[in-house]
Image (cartoon, rainbow, N blue to C red):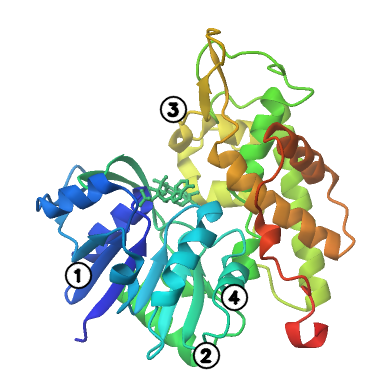
Amino acid sequence: MNVLKVAICGGGRTGHLNAILFKQLPNVQVSMLTGNLEIIERHARQTPMRALLPDGSTLEARLDRVTTDARTAVEDADIVIITVPAHARPQTLQAIAPHLSASKPVYIGAIPGFCGFDWLAEAALPDRPNLVIWGMKDVPHTAFELAPGRSIKMGGGKSKLYVATHARESQASRRQLQEMLTRLYGPCVTMLENYLEITLTPGNPIMHSSVIYGLIGPYGQWHRKIFPQPMCWWTECPELGAYFLERMDQESQELCTVISQRLGIDLSSVKSLKQEIVDAYGEQIRDQSSMLAILRTNQAYNDILAPMVPAADNRAGYVIERESRAFNEDVAYGLVLLVEMARRFDLKVPYIEEVLHWSVGYMQGLRDSALDYFPSHWPRPATAAA
Ligand SMILES: NC(=O)c1ccc[n+]([C@@H]2O[C@H](COP(=O)([O-])OP(=O)(O)OC[C@H]3O[C@@H](n4cnc5c(N)ncnc54)[C@H](OP(=O)(O)O)[C@@H]3O)[C@@H](O)[C@H]2O)c1
């Protein structure tokens, strides 16, 4: 069996867990590109990385290379997996672009692939026909409690892993990618027909922003107030947040319907968020009667804290963190994209827009966003637009 060279970009929770899982396989070399010197030091001291599995067992691994140097991490890679959050991807792609092989196909993908990774990679890696762009709809397993370079806890796994490629990729490249990912993840890898099936799947962008809006937006009970203690995202989800989420979920479905009809593509795999959650967690949800009940009674969501920081000026209590990923990733790279896609089809998405505009104000403006790479010609193909 030929050696498969995998480069993982990002030494966070998802990066650690995937790296350790891959190193259990024969003939798989794994390098990790990280900015975290602690991981590099641990690797140099031969400390094994450990994954703690839900059944109490442990997997150990020693990666082949752990480095801050983009060239060392990716120069001979067959497959590159970006695991940094969406707002950090442009910088990562910029760092690795000059060092990717030009003499063989290199499969470059993001896990998770949301926020239009296909468009970003196309824009960031122009004139590189040997690169095959792909994304996975979701993380294969949740990963939490990272001790960098030492251990990571594995949470629940997905029974199926959905993968899409950029529309430009050939059937042969898609088959090759599926083979590669099946080698890494097993026979659960399923290819989607269209990358939009990933981009339009509702998830964190509408979930996090609606709950925050319901808590501290203009009509929220915590508007301009300080929380006495940290709150749980879901078990303490406000009614107003669940209301906005349900509305935004409907608007996201309408967007999907319009795109499917106008572009003549099958997006039937994109379910509503409610359905996604029920399908993913099933019996772990005690009450499936409404969005609010689903969020509050899903045992898998217990104890997950909302992103909060101590209030400024020595005041007792907490406020929602402006610099959190719920804004920098989910709003700037998720909601912004949905609103722009709707605008291109003259579709009104007033709830999503309301939450987006308030969130951008709370963030004190957008520094960067998915609009930096969303193709100006979309939904027309590039050639027709030229
Ligand atoms: N963990 C999960 O269970 C889970 C579940 C669902 C979705 N996701 C998604 O998976 C992606 C990765 O999540 P994660 O939980 O693995 O994240 P994480 O533990 O925070 O790791 C992300 C890594 O990205 C790198 N990075 C570079 N610039 C960054 C920036 N500006 N902000 C934060 N990180 C930056 C860092 O790597 P270095 O330390 O190497 O510099 C960091 O360790 C995100 O899109 C997240 O929404 C994760």
Q: Which residue is mark 2?
A: 171
In this rendering, position of residue 371 left or right of residue 3:
right
Residue type, numbered disc 3: Asp
Q: Nearer the viewer, residue 297 or 386?
A: 386
In this rendering, position of residue 291 left or right of residue 232:
right
**Residue 255, quarter of picture:** bottom right
Q: Which residue is mark 4?
A: 122
Q: CA distance from mark 4 to mark 1?
A: 31 Å
Q: CA distance from mark 3 to mark 1?
A: 34 Å
Q: Which residue is mark 3?
A: 303
Q: Which residue is mark 1?
A: 25
In this rendering, position of residue 260 left or right of residue 367:
right
Badge 2 or badge 3: first in the primary sequence: 2
Badge 4 or badge 1: first in the primary sequence: 1
**Residue 165, quarter of picture:** bottom right
Residue 223, image x and y in percent? Answer: 72, 18
Badge 2 or badge 1: first in the primary sequence: 1
Asked if the beta carbon under badge 2 is closer than 8 A to the nearest atom of ligand 1, the reply is no
Outermost left residue: 46
For discs 4 and 2, the disc positioned in front in the rendered view: 4
For label 2, the SS is helix
Q: Residue at x 55, y 8 (%)?
A: 315
